[in-house]
Image: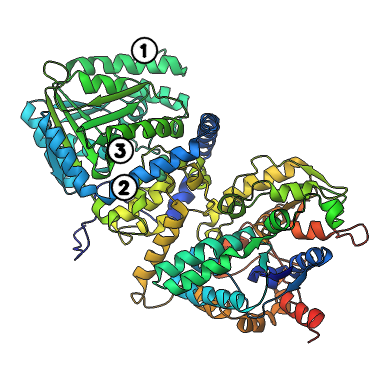
Amino acid sequence: MSQVFLGMPAPGAGNLFAEEQFPAAAHRELGNTQLRANLRHATHTIRDKRIRVVGELPDWEALRDAGSAIKDASMANLDQRLEEFEKNFTARGGIIHWARDADEANQIVTRLVRDTGSDEVVKVKSMATQEIGLNEHLEAQGIAAFETDLAELIVQLDHDKPSHILVPAIHKNRTEVRDIFLREMPQVDPALTNEPAKLAEAARLHLRKKFLSAKVAISGANFALADTGTLGVVESEGNGRMCLTLPETLITVMGIEKVLPNWQDIEVFMQLLPRSSTGERMNPYTSLWTGVTENDGPQNVHLVLLDNGRTRALSDKFGRTALNCIRCSACMNVCPVYERTGGHAYGSTYPGPIGAILSPLLTGIEAEENNSLPYASSLCGACYDACPVKINIPEILVHLRGEDVDSKRGKKLLPTQMDLLMKGGSWALSSGNHLGLLEKALPLGKLVAGKDKKIKKLPGIAAGWTSSRDLPAPPSKSFRDWWKSEKEGK
Amino acid sequence: MRIALFATCIVDAMYPETAKSTVKILERLGHEVIFPAGQACCGQMHINSGYMPEALPVVENHVKAFERSDYDVAVAPSGSCVSSVKHQHPVLAKRLGKPELKERAEAVGAKTYELSQLLTDVLGITNAAEQLGSYFPHTITYHPSCHGMRTLGLEDRQLNLLKSVGGITVEELPEADQCCGFGGTFSLKNSEVSSAMLDDKVKNICSTGASLCAGGDVSCLMHIGGGLSRSGQRPGTMHLADILASTREMEVAL
Ligand code: SF4
């Protein structure tokens, strides 16, 4: 992206783009029946678990309100919160690096790793580093990055892309995972079965050596607490904890929106996050660190604070609450579109409902094919209902559709069918008289319908409808006309 | 009570019987129904497709039509259009920098009810057979449309009304809370994903053995009905208002 936005904060780069229009990508993914079966099973299981544990809390709605309010307050003074965090983190021996975009962040991390003299790193599962394409960048610089989260490891070994933010390998079933391990793990037991315990054991053996030898770890962070200068990672497997404690150098890459005002705020988020993401009351491992502790854990502690379009998203007053996202993944687990297309259809690191708003907010609606993402929703609202910080995703989707339509005004030579439909519709539907006049033509619909009073084939964009649905023949008289003759005697 | 009917454009043009049924039910209860003449559409199609300036005259027209007439409450046989009136109109006005329209839209929205909401919360209907004389001796199932369920929070209002109809059997719809895939222009722009969602809805409806699927939004019912019809399955669809309007004397045919 070489576009210059005057007066508009810089757009994000990295893995934030749909590479093709969503309907085309969805067409491909819908054809993969194995994928659909895996996704259906996985999303439904996690949905049920989430509903069960959320239902246990009588104050769930109050917690959601609190989460949303804390995030709003934090975002309203983000600059001050970040400076406060920097001061406290630095005072405890941590070193802060500010990165404007993906490129800068990648360069900073590369330099920090090089400075240690190491050519390999272990990684804690992190969305920010996926977003900036850090693994690929490091590889190109001759530094090997080893994912240690089981699902990330599977995806990495398969040279694939994550398709879910919490369960990156959700599109693979157990047998597929076994096959990947047999193919890609050098010393794996050739008799490996597809039992989850056996697969986990194979991964553990594979990773153990890395944990013990790695000098550098790279992580993301779930939150940063401004008043104490503390960073936190929430995880299930404990592999993250190993990375965060064993190596000498720890480099964390975190989006600037993750900062919370107070230590006390984690009380709210530690209740919201595990329940919303894995459907557990509590996650097994929560690691918190504040700068450097002498002779305990990493002695070189860095934090790369990443903008990459976040300031841009923050400047959009109708879209900025998307930055309140705590990456729990509840919205994609309940999304009927995601359930059918999977995460790859969205192109970006962030799939599902949150991805459909966050990616275009970070990059700008006109970037690559991101303008198709806000339409990847029936606006059913299941995401908004599930979101622990109450991001009104449907409303932001609609807002971004408006941005998309506005961005094209005056640029096209010919109006699209949709433009014409909307222009005509605006005339017809903005007056009872106009609509009444058009309704006089309703009997004509009978001409299009078959003997069974059904319309089975329509041209143009309406063909999308008749590809799988009939349309009833219209009535001969509108309600409006009936009312006039019956009730008003006209 | 003087009740203003917002027929909604799709009911007005495609499903006039549903508006007539709404009038019938309310008149049966002794209320006066008026039809504000200038009304046309809530503008949701334009708003949800991103055509905000084009939506503006549609929204302005609705607000004008419903602030001009003299009535106690307004009602529409649609959860989706009522959601738009209550929630989208003020948001659109704000986006387009029209604070005065926002206020007027909020005033109209506050007086507007979805049918089951009006019947249950305002008119105190808890038993359709007894209070409305509703009679419909068939086995049905019920799809709760998303905007009514989630944006308006209708909960079981529609279902409870249906269950209290005389002679009716209501079979539970598996995965009822899942969207049917309509989504307005979503069904055109992303027609394949929409169809995949519809497929599952159709399968679930057929699995109940019901003769028809009832609901509170003709747009979703048109979508579901279109899928059922295309797949050659027996069940049809019918709006809640038409079932409530059906009586022993004047039974509505399947
Ligand atoms: S948008 Fe809400 S539900 Fe979706 S991942 Fe973010 S916090 Fe979770």
Tell me whether the residue at label 2 lies in contact with that at label 3, contact meaning CB atoms closer than 8 angstroms: no
**What is the image's colouring?**
rainbow
Location of residue A490 in the rendering, given as x and y in whole percent from the top left corner: 78, 87
Q: Nearer the N terminus, badge 2 or badge 1?
A: 2
Residue pointed to by mark 3: A127
> Residue sitting at 63 percent across and 76 percent down?
B39
Residue pointed to by mark 1: A189
Q: Nearer the viewer, mark 1 or mark 3?
A: 3
- Find the distance from the CA under tag 2 to the CA under tag 1: 53 Å
Disc 1 marks which amino acid?
Asp
- Find the distance from the CA under tag 1 to the CA under tag 3: 31 Å
Label 1 CB less than 8 angstroms from ligand 1: no
Callout 2: SS:
helix
Disc 2 marks which amino acid?
Ala
> Residue sitting at 40 percent across and 71 percent down?
B96
Few, some or many residues within 10 Å of mark 3 (<14, 14–19, 20+) = many
Quarter-wise, where is residue A96 in the image?
top left
Q: Nearer the N terminus, badge 1 or badge 3?
A: 3
Q: Mark 1 vs mark 3: same chain? A: yes
Identify the mark at residue A173; answer none if there is no mark: none
